Image: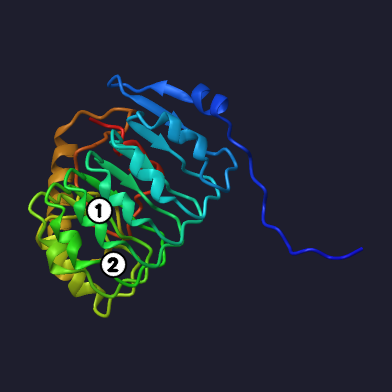
Amino acid sequence: MAKGKAKGPKGKKITLKIAKNSIRVSFDGGLHLDLSKMGITTFPNCILKLADVDELDLSRNMIRKIPSSIEKFQKLRWLDLHSNQLEELPKAIGTLQKLFYLNLCNNKLTTLPEELKLLKNLHILNIGLNCLESIPISLGALSELREIGLFDNALTTIPNSVETLPKLKKMNVERNPFPDSANHEECVDSIKRIETLYLVQEKDLCHSCLKTCQGEKDKLNKLMNMTPSSSKKLTFPSLLTPNSSAKDNQEEWRVRGKQP
């Protein structure tokens, strides 16, 4: 029997009926098409007939390519493509002018199209866990960007145009091979881009940070001495602690995008 070419996983076939049954009304009244975790290997062209949805979730599948026909989703505000097999993005993604949230985390992207700079309404962009060695300077045109995830790539530098975006509040650059990681993290922290803080050991702290923490610890001890004894342990949820390795996970970014 003649041997044929090896084929990849066939994947689940998505019909228009399946897609229609996967539409839900989101918390703000928009239409949310959820085709996540469906075993899809090829972008289902049938959903082009549902291009009036506001949110599209194709995450956690095995999709290798997004076609240029994505441009038909002109009402799209929320696009989640994380955890697929994407190696590139179509230039047409830049036509999605209403896009507010874009999640491309955990794919195989090595480059980003310049057309991303056209997404003028983009507030949240997650491109962590890819194979990026650089990001376009043109991303500095995303003047509405509030959060960007660049963690777990192969980046050696971040363009100044991105670091100085006027409305940027959070930038996660953890686990990239920066030539001078300490100086880079200090620079990022000095412009207050990193907001999530975690407990670390004393040996991981510089002298000034350790001194600050000891001061906070002394204040805490005084407070505990002033408080009547109780069998219940005190908790201080608002107490800030120094940064250590980033522990932002994919679920946090996914949930953040659904907030108004």
- Indicate the colouring scheme: rainbow
Q: Is residue 13 left or right of residue 140?
A: right
The answer to which of 242 and 154 lies nearer the viewer is 154
Q: Which residue is mark 2?
A: 204
SS label for mark 2: helix
66 shown above or below 233: below
Q: Residues within 10 Å of mark 1 (few under 14, many from 20)?
A: many
- Quarter-wise, where is residue 185 in the image? bottom left
The residue depicted at 25 percent of the width and 62 percent of the height is 114
Residue 243 point in image, percent of width and height? 24, 57
Q: Tell me residue 35's x, y (percent).
A: 50, 35
Residue in the picture at 31% in, 33% down: 258
Question: Which quarter of the rendered picture does the C terminus lie within?
Answer: top left
Whole-angstrom CA distance, mark 2 to mark 1, is 26 Å
Q: For the residues labelled 2 and 1, say whether their Cβ atoms are less than 8 Å apart.
A: no
Task: Give the x, y percent position of residue 134.
Answer: 29, 71
Q: Give how far across and how far down residue 255 sits, in percent.
A: 34, 36
Left or right of 57 in this view: 196:
left
Which comes sooner in the sequence, label 2 or label 1? 1
On residue 148, the disc is 1
Q: Can the viewer see residue 252 in this picture?
A: no
Q: In the displayed orientation, state which residue is furthest to the bottom.
A: 179
Between residue 239 and residue 128, name the one nearer to us.
128
What is the residue that sits farthest to the left in this orientation?
166
Disc 2 marks a residue whose amino acid type is Asp
Q: Which residue sits at x=35%, y=66%?
A: 111
Q: What is the crowding at mark 2: few (fewer than 14 residues within 10 Å), some, or many (at least 20)?
A: few
Q: Is residue 249 visible?
A: yes
Tag 1: amino acid: Ile
Check the image and report above or below for 186 versus 82: below
